[in-house]
Structure formats: structure tokens, C-alpha cells
Image (cartoon, grey):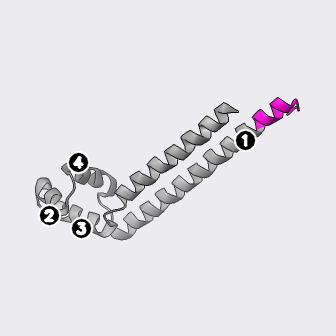
Amino acid sequence: MDQIKLRIFRSARRKKRQKEIRDEEGSIPEEQIIGVLKQLKAGRKVPDLAREIGVSAATIYTWKSKYGGMDVSDARRLKSLEEENRRLKQIVADLSLDKEALTTVIRKNGWSL
């Protein structure tokens, strides 16, 4: 039973970390990201853009690899699909944890599967 409690604790801690990461990522709207990438394509320097909007140069390169060549509507669609994928993965993880807990209880009580 201690393993189940430990898994639940780890799952809750992982959820908290994922939420913090999502909050950090969501601070700049897609329109601004696409606008920055268009300015980059027009010839502006990465350090200048990074300083102007308050992010690191690495963040701009990450945006470039993730959103390069997209329109604003494509970026919004990507974010919504990523959010849906995250939710579905969380559901699978929760159901797997429930299954494991029920299996442990069944074995403990001597019932067969």
C-alpha cells in the first residue's frame, strides 16, 4: 500500500511541475511569437529581439524550431492539440494508477483475476 501512496504523491508532484511549466510557456501569446519570428526572418538580430521582449536567445531559437513557417491560426491549433494530448496522457496515467491500486487490493484479499 505504501507503493501506491508513493505513486500518488509522485503523480501529484509531477502535475504541479507540469502546470508551472505550462504557466511559463503560456506567458507570451502566439501572435507575438509569430510576430517575433517574422521580424527574425526580415533580418533582425536574435539578441536584439530577445532583449526587446524579455526572453533568452535560446527561447527564440526554440520558438523558431517549433513555430517556424506557421501562421497564427496554425500555432493556436498546435497549442490546443498539445493541451488535448496532455489531458489524454494524464487520463491514461490516472487510469493506470487506479488499475494498479485495484490489482493490489484484489491480490491482498486473495481474490483471483
Residue 2 rendering spot, x and y as whole percentages: 66, 32
**Disc 2/disc 1 C-alpha distance (Å):** 54 Å
Q: Nearer the viewer, mark 3 or mark 1?
A: 1
Answer with left or right where residue 104 lies relative to residue 70: right
Q: Residues within 10 Å of mark 3 (few under 14, many from 20)?
A: few
- Identify the image quadrant of residue 105: top right
50 over 1 or under it: above or below: below
**Front disc: 2 or 4:** 4
Label the magenta part by its dominant secondary structure. Answer: helix
Residue under pointer 4: 58
Q: Amino acid at mark 2?
A: Ala
Q: Which residue is mark 1?
A: 99
Q: Which comes before the other along the chain, label 2 or label 1?
A: 2
Measure the alpha-carbon separation of dots 2 and 4: 19 Å
Point 61% across, 45% down: residue: 93
For disc 3, the marked residue is 35
Q: Is residue 42 left or right of residue 27?
A: left
Task: Identify the mark at residue 63; answer none if there is no mark.
Answer: none
Residue depicted at 60% across the width and 35% down the height: 6
- Report which residue position mark 2 lands on: 42
Return the disc, 4 or 1, that comes first in the chain's sequence.
4
Q: CA distance from mark 3 to mark 1?
A: 46 Å
Magenta residues, start to end: 103-113
Q: Nearer the viewer, residue 19 or 71?
A: 19
Disc 1 crowd, CA 10 A, few/some/many (<14, 14-19, 20+): few
Q: Amino acid at mark 1?
A: Lys
